[in-house]
Image (spheres, helix red, strand yellow):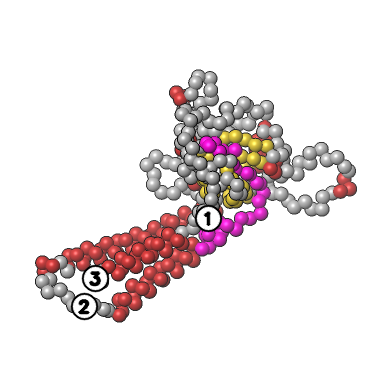
Amino acid sequence: MTTLKPIVAIMALAGAIMAAVPTLAQAPVPAPVVQEAAPPAAAPAAVPATPAAPAFAHAAPEAGIGQPVPGAITLQPQFTEVGADARWMHNAVLMPIITVISLFVLLLLLYAVFRYRAKVNPLPSGTSHNTFIEVMWTLAPVVILVVIAVPSIQLLAKQYAAPRADLTVKVIGNQWYWTYQYPDNGDFEIVSNMLREKDEIPAGQRARTDADGPRLLAVDERMVVPAGAVVKLIVTSNDVIHSFAVPAFWAKMDAVPGRLNETWFKVDRPGVYYGQCSELCGARHAYMPIAVEVVPPARFAAWVASKGGTMKGAAPAAPAANETVPAAAPAQGATAS
Ligand SMILES: [Cu+2]
């Protein structure tokens, strides 16, 4: 059946596309994954945070920005350069090619089924080879793959070529919440728990409001980062494998106990962007959302102060005199003031 060969070629092509699509998959490592049975009604590990001394007014989320839209099926709007490129790759390269190939193969199949049906072909054709068409159905997929490979590999390289970091945040996955450490800013740590609905918690506890974010995505303590800064994330875990993922940043990285994985993002637009743990990590895997608030640099300094941290370069009461002017301390980015 000559019509089978294009299908085989298409399947090979699909496999190659899957292999070509950039992925952040980790090499499998023997990790002590203990999917323990959750204690019933396990409360989030940390109690709702007490308000810090200098209050910091958080921004409210915007519909359709940094969060899913009901009924939508496509990628979220992207707010990093890598994300914008990847979205273009998906929408302008992969989807059109996949659609054309799928329709072409479907039409070929339907044509062959109808045209060569047994009823009107009592004597089957004896044709077995056609050199031209065999060369074509070998070469065409190769050309398509090469065309896809160029932007794909460029995108992959861009994803891994992290610029010099302006801010480092250590992201730690826990069953079932996230902690964020700011080693550049006095090494303070914040604990981020999902906010629950009013009717799900005892009266008096902090419940989610729309200013916090959508249900199942809002958290009590957001990761706050400055706009326009290259943020390096060092991602790890305290217990089982989690995955830190913020779709609007095109950022996803496995959080593996005993390993430090690294990814980065740079967002210029202030706003609130949500994500979720993206590695099945236990009973409350669905209830450890991620909220990242991108703020202007001055607001970031205010937030750091509200957490008891210090800004890098803010000279914490320098003991000695001025003669040891730091020999051009490398400008540590937009966050320093
Ligand atoms: Cu998790």
Distance between the alpha carbons at the discs numbered 3 and 1: 40 Å
Residues 174 and 89: in front is 174
The residue that appears at 27% across and 68% down in the rendered structure is: 4
Say which element carries label 2: loop
For residue 146, above or below residue 275? below
Q: In screen coordinates, is 332 left or right of 158?
A: right
Distance between the alpha carbons at the discs numbered 2 and 1: 48 Å
Type of amino acid under label 3: Met
Q: Which mark is residue 127?
A: 2
* In the image, residue 163 lies in the stretch drawn in magenta: yes
> Dividing the image into 4 quarters, which one contains the C terminus?
top right
> Dividing the image into 4 quarters, which one contains the N terminus?
bottom left
For residue 264, above or below residue 150? above
Question: Of the residues under marks 3 and 1, which one precedes in the sequence?
Answer: 3
Question: Of the residues under marks 2 and 3, which one precedes in the sequence?
Answer: 3
Question: Of the residues under marks 2 and 1, which one precedes in the sequence?
Answer: 1
Q: Where residue 246 appears, x then y in whole percent?
A: 52, 45
Q: Quadrant of residue 184?
A: top right
Mark 2 is surrounded, within 10 Å at the Cα level, by few (under 14), some (14 to 19) or many (20 or more) other residues, namely: few
Type of amino acid under label 1: Ala
Q: In screen coordinates, is 79 left or right of 299?
A: left
Q: Nearer the viewer, mark 3 or mark 1?
A: 1
The residue that appears at 31% across and 68% down in the rendered structure is: 6
Say which element carries label 3: loop
Type of amino acid under label 2: Thr
Q: Where residue 96 appears, x then y in whole percent?
A: 38, 60
- In the rendered image, which residue does mark 3 sit on? 1
Q: Which residues are magenta?
A: 153-179
Residues 199 and 81: in front is 199
Whether tag 2 and tag 1 are in contact, CB under 8 A, the answer is: no
Q: Which mark is residue 27?
A: 1
